[in-house]
Image (tube, rainbow, N blue to C red):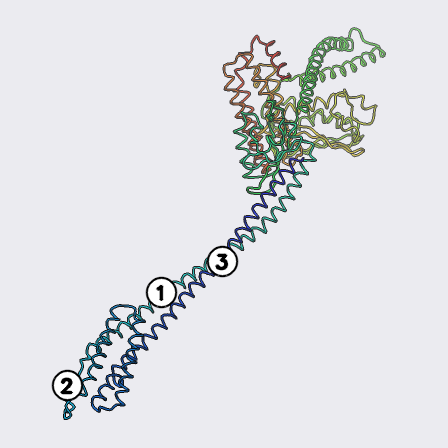
């Protein structure tokens, strides 16, 4: 089983590979989380630095513009200039030059801060205004001494309107830039926020995925452990099985095989693993097998494959050995496996074939025996009737009266002769029934009336011994049987006669009846006699077996009465049985079909096709059908009977087709199609019954069997006889070849 271990190792390696993949995905997820965190941090840092830089620059610009406006406005450079002009004080000149220098520094600083040429141009306008003011300082010493302030102001006046306009322009631009920067910062901040939100969502997804993967990894490990345990169990099962075993995947591939399977099919392990299982069945069955395989995995449950028909395997060298297959399953879903237990039944089929041949020889011998008994019975009855006739003439001849000793001798002759005649008649009945030659006349019978008549005829038998027959049936509920009047009376009279014969002096015989659940009438005859020993009960219905433990009374019977009775009951689609207890008595009962019965068939002359072998098969099928009809749902052997009926139906079809083929019957192909369809219907109905175990399904199944068998015998096979005339030898040869096929 080293190959099995290698396969198991391969499965484990596959599980480990998946584990590595899961770990790599988890690691990749963690790396992605780290990268995302870094990117998010960088974005927020960029926004923050940009905002801080802007704030520093905006503060410097705002401060410069404020200083510049202060220099131009009250208390600034221009204000100092006007004070100096009006007062001509050297101190004001110092202040003026200082303010001019500060203003120039502010302008120079703003030139570095302001980003646009237009703004720097406006600074140039302000600088030019400042220069014009400084130029006017040189004019002041040359003014007339007596110039009044108005004249002085007119001489040194500088138009500072452009400077003020430039200042307003710069204030406006600074405000617009501040708003734009705020908007850009807000957008950048929003973008970073959106990225962060998306990132958080992605982080959650990645974390969830990581958790799922971790859970999956844990489960995968558990599954791998369970798989190893399952493989170990399967390996042990396969290794220890004496039968060939396969494990098949839902795809149809063989994934396991033990050594016995390799021997059966002729493949090496390497060749067997991965092979399609359909390659291991005959080609004409492969499509059907594929459908059955799909059905099994849809509803996996332990079952026998093709229980009601013979199936074959396909080996590498082309052999097709007959096999029995049992299916079970392991695992679910993609891990499901069909565990196939195969049993090579070649030797078993050979044994069955030999048993069938032995059975056929026994049946042939029994048939010859029956024919011999029938012939001998006829031969014995003729001289025996002559002996009895002459004895009666001697006894009744008035012209030659017999002496007392002679009368006793004649009485002995009459007694022995009548006993022998009864024996011969019973042997003749037995031979006819066994040979299938007993004719029946079927009609609706008043069972109450028949029982009353038989009780009346049997009552005198027990009078001399004080035995009373109690009839609890005739006056009860009315029952109509579908049967043969004469044979029914023969059955009842024999049961009543035995009940009296093996009873105790002063005892009772009670006859009762009731309807069964499957529309049969059960009639019981109970005595208070000596009973039947348990060791003797298995031989009650055997030929020439005498009832009772009293050997003196046992000689009163012929020993074949109950055997004939059993055959008659079964011939009338019924059954017979008994219960007995030593010193308490016995109850013998029969069950026969009522008129309302829808499942039983009684063979009669109208059902004969006229071909000996086919009629023989039909009689056996009718007998099997009746046995199935008599069973209840709880009968342990019901399934066995159904399978026996299927087996013989298939065998009958093969025999019938062989006969039709050798006789060149024109409808052979049509018959084959009908046979195949019928086998399929029977198998489906039987499987439905086995699955549900419903009494109503069983009843419908029996009705179908009866309808099919009646139609098959009376209609389908009715035209076969014409093609068989004059071909007895060919038919016998064909059937003999079929036995050895």
Cβ–Cβ under 8 Å for marks 3 and 2: no
Residue 556 in the figure: left or right of residue 616: right
Which quadrant holds residue 233?
A: top right
Q: Is residue 184 above or below residue 480?
A: below
- Circle number at residue 33: 3
Which dot, 1 or 2, sits closer to the camera?
2
Residue 539 in the figure: left or right of residue 620: right
Estimate the spatial distance between the alpha carbons at disc 1 and disc 2, rounded to whole Å: 54 Å
- Mark 2 surroundings within 10 Å by alpha-carbon count, few (fewer than 14), some (14 through 19), many (20 or more): few
Residue 286 lies, in percent from the top left, at 54, 28
Res. 644 in view:
yes
Q: Earlier in the sequence, mark 1 or mark 2?
A: 2
Residue 39 in the figure: left or right of residue 729: left
Q: Which residue is mark 2?
A: 154
Q: Is residue 670 above or below residue 681?
A: above
- Circle number at residue 525: none
Which quadrant holds residue 416?
A: top right
In the image, farthest residue toward the right: 405
- Mark 1 surroundings within 10 Å by alpha-carbon count, few (fewer than 14), some (14 through 19), many (20 or more): few
SS assignment at label 3: helix
Res. 515 in view:
no
Q: Is residue 591 above or below residue 420?
A: below
Estimate the spatial distance between the alpha carbons at disc 3 and disc 2, rounded to whole Å: 76 Å
- Circle number at residue 187: 1
Estimate the spatial distance between the alpha carbons at disc 3 and disc 1, rounded to whole Å: 25 Å
Quarter of the image with the C terminus in it: top right
């Amino acid at each position: 089983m080293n190959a099995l271990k290698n396969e198991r190792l391969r499965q484990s390696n596959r599980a480990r590979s998946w584990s590595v993949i899961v770990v790599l995905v988890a690691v990749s997820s963690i790396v992605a989380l780290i990268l995302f965190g870094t990117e998010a941090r960088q974005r927020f840092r960029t926004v923050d630095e940009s905002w801080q830089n802007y704030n520093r620059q905006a503060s410097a610009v705002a401060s410069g513009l404020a200083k510049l406006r202060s220099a131009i406005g009250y208390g600034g450079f221009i204000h100092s200039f006007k004070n100096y002009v009006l007062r001509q004080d050297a101190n004001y000149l110092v202040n003026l030059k200082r303010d001019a220098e500060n203003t120039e520094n502010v302008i120079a600083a703003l030139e570095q801060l302001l980003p646009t040429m237009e703004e720097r141009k406006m600074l140039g306008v302000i600088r030019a205004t400042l220069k014009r003011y400084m130029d006017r300082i040189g004019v002041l010493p040359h003014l007339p001494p007596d110039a009044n302030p108005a004249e002085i102001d007119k001489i040194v006046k500088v138009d500072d309107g452009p400077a003020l306009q430039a200042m307003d322009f710069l204030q406006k631009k600074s405000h617009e830039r501040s708003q734009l920067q705020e908007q850009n910062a807000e957008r950048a901040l929003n973008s970073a926020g959106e990225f962060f939100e998306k990132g958080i969502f992605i982080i959650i997804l990645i974390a969830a995925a990581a958790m799922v993967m971790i859970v999956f990894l844990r489960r995968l490990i558990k599954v791998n452990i369970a798989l190893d345990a399952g493989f170990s169990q399967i390996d042990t099962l396969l290794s220890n099985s004496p039968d060939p075993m396969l494990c098949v995947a839902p795809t149809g591939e063989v994934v396991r095989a033990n050594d016995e399977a390799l021997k059966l099919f002729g493949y090496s392990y390497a060749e067997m693993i991965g092979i399609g299982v359909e390659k291991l069945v005959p080609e004409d069955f492969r499509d059907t097998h594929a459908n059955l395989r799909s059905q099994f995995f849809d509803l996996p449950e332990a079952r026998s494959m093709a229980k009601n028909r013979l199936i074959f395997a396909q080996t590498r060298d082309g052999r097709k050995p007959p096999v029995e297959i049992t299916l079970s399953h392991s695992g679910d879903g993609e891990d499901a496996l069909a565990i196939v237990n195969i049993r090579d039944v070649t030797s078993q089929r050979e044994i069955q074939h030999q048993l069938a041949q032995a059975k056929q020889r026994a049946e042939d011998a029994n048939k010859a025996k029956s024919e011999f008994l029938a012939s001998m019975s006829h031969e014995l009855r003729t001289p025996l009737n002559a002996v009895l006739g002459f004895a009666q003439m001697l006894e009744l001849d008035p012209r030659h009266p017999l002496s007392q000793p002679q009368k006793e001798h004649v009485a002995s002759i009459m007694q022995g002769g009548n006993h022998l005649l009864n024996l011969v008649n019973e042997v003749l009945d037995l031979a006819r029934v066994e040979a299938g030659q007993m004719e029946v006349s079927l009609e609706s019978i008043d069972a109450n009336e028949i029982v009353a008549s038989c009780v009346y005829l049997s009552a005198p038998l027990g009078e001399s011994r004080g035995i009373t027959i109690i009839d609890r049936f005739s006056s009860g509920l009315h029952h109509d049987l579908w049967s043969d009047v004469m044979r029914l009376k023969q059955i009842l009279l024999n049961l009543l006669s035995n009940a009296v014969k093996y009873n105790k002096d002063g005892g009772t015989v009670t006859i009762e009846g009731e309807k069964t659940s499957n529309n049969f009438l059960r009639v019981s005859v109970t005595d208070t006699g000596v009973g039947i020993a348990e060791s003797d009960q298995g031989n009650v219905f055997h030929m020439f077996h005498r009832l009772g433990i009293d050997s003196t009374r046992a000689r009163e019977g012929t020993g074949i009465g109950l055997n004939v009775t059993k055959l008659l009951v079964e011939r009338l689609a019924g059954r017979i049985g008994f219960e007995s207890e030593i010193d308490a008595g016995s109850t013998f009962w029969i069950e026969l079909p009522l008129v309302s019965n829808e499942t039983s068939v009684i063979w009669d002359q109208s059902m004969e096709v006229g071909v000996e072998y086919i009629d023989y098969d039909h009689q056996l099928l009718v007998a099997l059908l009746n046995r199935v009809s008599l069973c209840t749902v709880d009968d342990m052997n019901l399934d066995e009977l159904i399978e026996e009926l299927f087996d013989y139906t298939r065998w009958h079809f093969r025999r019938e087709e062989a006969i039709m083929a050798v006789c060149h019957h024109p409808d052979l192909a049509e018959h084959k199609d009908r046979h195949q369809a019928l086998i399929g219907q029977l198998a489906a109905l039987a499987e439905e019954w086995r699955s549900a175990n419903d009494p109503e399904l069983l009843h419908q199944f029996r009705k179908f069997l009866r309808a099919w068998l009646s139609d098959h015998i009376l209609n389908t096979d009715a035209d076969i006889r014409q093609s068989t005339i004059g071909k007895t030898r060919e038919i016998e040869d064909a059937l003999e070849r079929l036995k050895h096929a």
